[in-house]
Image: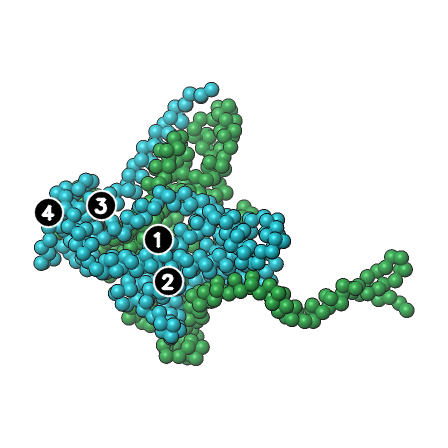
Chain colours: A cyan, B green
């Protein structure tokens, strides 16, 4: 039997729909605007005639960006850092989380505290940079100074993600593990054949957390790497001179698109990969956030 | 012979005598050679302990070594020698920041105030938004429509800080005439909310607007995504609770008041406490990317001040470390306090 909606319910429902739609559209608007402005003609962008849809369409802003080798270079650096950074972080995190999830591990509490303490207390930017200066010789010896490999191994670890993985591993029934051991599986086989397949969704979530933070990483890449050929995309975007120049005073800009369009085109290019995979991954994020009921 | 009651003696009921506990020998041995036994256990199970090593090294290197460098706040900075050999100066940097009376000290207090205010306004405006969104999402019965709205509102969370701040800068950028300023400034001028001169100068160059821009962009970025956890709490409510309330004649507001809010309360309390716990952990990246010399008055927070003082040619790393030290210690006390309260209040500990 379907109950008739009361007036108060109806009002609240209407308010909900309206406000949600408005908020969702406002969330999307800056991106839509960026896309429209990136493909609109010079005059309409400089005089802000673009409001929602592109006008006087041109693709030269994109074309000239695609001709820019530094753009492709920074793009490939970002892909490199995202791929290897995620693999590195996942490898270290999975191994550590697996060991921490074992009740038989000696000093388990101490190791957990070692991890959790970094969530309470982080040294801050200046000491982290001083530490980087103090340990530079190590990187120089390994040959990754001023190199994207440095960004791959540095700073990317998050205690929270390891704890998420540890909780997932703790949820694997011990009978299955025992069965695997009886069948003669070694420690690494137990991990790779039992624990990893059984916590696939948490592993996917954590990997995505790492991948997104790598893709978006900016500050340390900028501070630690001075060689512009090793810069990732985020640093490249930020270092575009047009960002800080008043377009009114820019002389010698002769293209048929506005300087703003060039920046918008860059922004659009940096978000397109995320926009493409986003619909497939967002359910994992919802899951990961809800798995946050963390205990020690 | 009189039997002495000792820990390691067992009372034998049959004979009425005390005898030695056979396992005690093993226990004694373990106690005497504790580290030997630890070593043996680790040697037998070495694969498990080997797995821990990379993680421990990474955290040692990137998290604990910086804490050691932080001790530089008590020392005279010298890049050529390790912190332990630098000259000890005690609390002089702390004194200089807290009661120095110079411009550095006043910027420190300004940054302290800004750090607190940015967090506090985030608590006032940023915190209720996800809860409201979750309540609204619950009203959308069609799964397709709800998923679509959720996907749209989560999206900004996945944009990098650089992209987000670049967009903000473009939307409120300066311009010599109304048609050349950013589209949002233009709208605000046309609505009469800001004067044309303010719009011309660019909103991000005006200290009066920094906090608003920071909060609004924060809501844009995070409100949708943060609503996930509240929405999960709402959909966990059993439909029978609503039905019971309806039979009792509760209208929508009464249902909200007596069914939905009580069920969400523990989640809200936990999130609120977490938020208070991280009151001093302002994301420095966003501030660094958005602020400029014109807006230090309202935008400068402790970590950005420390960054400028220590790394970008300021008064030196010692003072900068001292500022970070104070921020971190107070921040840690807040986190631990918040976590303790959460544990007491709801038996759920966050860490």
Residue A166 image point, x, y percent:
52, 54
Q: From the viewer's perspective, is the residue at label 3 or at label 2 nearer?
A: 2
Looking at the rendered image, the quarter that the N terminus of chain B falls into is bottom right
Q: For mark 3, what is the residue?
A: A35
CA gap between label 2 and label 1 equals 32 Å
Q: From the viewer's perspective, is the residue at label 2 or at label 1 nearer?
A: 2
The chain that hosts pointer 3 is A
The chain that hosts pointer 4 is A
Residue B204 is tagged as none
- How many discs appear? 4
The chain that hosts pointer 2 is A
Q: For mark 1, what is the residue?
A: B118
CA gap between label 3 and label 4 equals 16 Å
Q: From the viewer's perspective, is the residue at label 3 or at label 1 nearer?
A: 3
Crowd rating for badge 4 (residues with CA inside 10 Å; few <14, some 14–19, many 20+): some
Image position of A48 with respect to A185: above or below: above
Q: From the viewer's perspective, is the residue at label 2 or at label 4 nearer?
A: 2
B63 sits to left or right of B17: left
Residue A43 is tagged as 4
Residue at x 32%, y 53% (from the top left corner)? B160
Q: Are marks 1 and 4 in contact (CB under 8 Å)?
A: no
User: Can residue B304 be seen at all in this image of the molecule?
Assistant: no
CA gap between label 2 and label 4 equals 42 Å
């Amino acid at each position: 039997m379907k109950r008739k909606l009361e007036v108060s319910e109806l009002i609240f429902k209407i308010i909900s729909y309206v406000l949600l739609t408005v908020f969702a559209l406002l969330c999307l608007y800056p991106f839509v605007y960026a896309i429209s402005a990136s493909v609109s003609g010079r005059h309409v962008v400089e005089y802000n005639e673009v409001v929602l849809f592109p006008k006087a369409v041109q693709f030269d802003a994109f074309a000239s960006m695609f001709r820019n080798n530094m753009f492709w270079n920074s793009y490939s650096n970002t892909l490199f850092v995202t791929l290897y950074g995620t693999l590195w972080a996942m490898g270290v995190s999975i191994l550590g989380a697996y060991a921490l999830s074992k009740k038989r591990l000696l000093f388990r509490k101490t190791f957990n505290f070692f991890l959790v303490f970094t969530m309470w207390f982080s040294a801050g930017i200046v000491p982290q940079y001083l530490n980087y200066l103090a340990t530079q010789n190590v990187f120089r010896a390994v040959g990754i100074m001023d190199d994207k490999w440095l960004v791959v191994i540095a700073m990317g670890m998050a205690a929270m993600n390891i704890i998420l993985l540890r909780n997932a591993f703790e949820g694997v029934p011990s009978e299955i593990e025992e069965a695997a051991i009886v069948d003669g599986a070694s420690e690494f086989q137990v991990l790779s054949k039992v624990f990893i397949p059984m916590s696939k969704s948490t592993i996917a979530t954590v990997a995505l957390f790492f991948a997104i933070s790598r893709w978006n990483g900016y500050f340390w890449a900028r501070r630690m790497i001075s060689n512009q050929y090793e810069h990732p995309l985020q640093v490249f975007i930020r270092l575009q001179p047009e960002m800080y120049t008043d377009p009114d005073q820019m002389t010698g800009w002769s293209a048929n698109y506005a300087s703003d369009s060039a920046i918008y085109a860059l922004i659009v290019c940096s978000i397109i990969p995320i926009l493409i995979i986003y619909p497939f991954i967002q359910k994992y994020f919802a899951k990961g956030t809800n798995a946050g009921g963390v205990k020690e | 012979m009189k039997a002495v009651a000792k820990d390691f003696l067992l009372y034998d009921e049959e004979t009425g005598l005390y005898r030695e506990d056979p396992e005690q020998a093993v226990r004694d041995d373990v106690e005497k050679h504790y580290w030997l036994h630890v070593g043996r256990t680790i040697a037998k199970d070495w694969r498990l302990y080997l797995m821990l090593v990379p993680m421990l090294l990474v955290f040692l290197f990137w998290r604990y070594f910086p804490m050691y460098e932080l001790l530089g706040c008590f020392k005279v900075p010298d890049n050529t020698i390790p912190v332990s050999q630098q000259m000890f100066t005690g609390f002089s940097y702390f004194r200089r920041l807290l009661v120095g009376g110079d411009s550095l000290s006043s910027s420190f207090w300004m940054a302290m105030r800004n750090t607190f205010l940015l967090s506090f306004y985030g608590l006032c405006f940023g915190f209720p938004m996800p809860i409201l969104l979750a309540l609204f999402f619950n009203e959308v019965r069609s799964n397709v429509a709800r998923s679509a709205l959720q996907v749209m509102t989560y999206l900004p969370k996945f944009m990098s800080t650089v992209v987000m701040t670049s967009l903000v800068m473009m939307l409120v950028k300066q311009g010599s005439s109304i048609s050349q300023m950013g589209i949002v400034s233009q709208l605000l001028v046309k609505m009469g909310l800001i004067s044309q001169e303010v719009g011309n100068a660019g909103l991000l160059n005006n200290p009066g607007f920094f906090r608003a821009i920071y909060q609004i962009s924060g809501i844009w970025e995070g409100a949708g995504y943060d609503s996930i956890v509240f929405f999960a709490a709402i959909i966990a409510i059993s439909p029978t609770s609503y039905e019971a309330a309806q039979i009792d004649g509760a209208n929508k507001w009464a249902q909200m008041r007596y069914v939905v809010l009580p069920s969400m309360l523990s989640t809200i309390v936990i999130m609120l406490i977490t938020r208070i716990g991280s009151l001093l952990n302002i994301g420095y990246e966003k501030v660094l990317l958005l602020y400029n010399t014109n807006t230090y008055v309202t935008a400068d927070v402790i970590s950005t001040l420390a960054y400028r003082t220590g790394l970008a040619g300021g008064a030196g790393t010692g003072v900068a470390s001292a500022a970070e030290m104070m921020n971190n210690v107070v921040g840690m006390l807040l986190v631990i306090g918040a976590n303790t309260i959460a544990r007491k209040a709801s038996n759920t500990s966050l860490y």
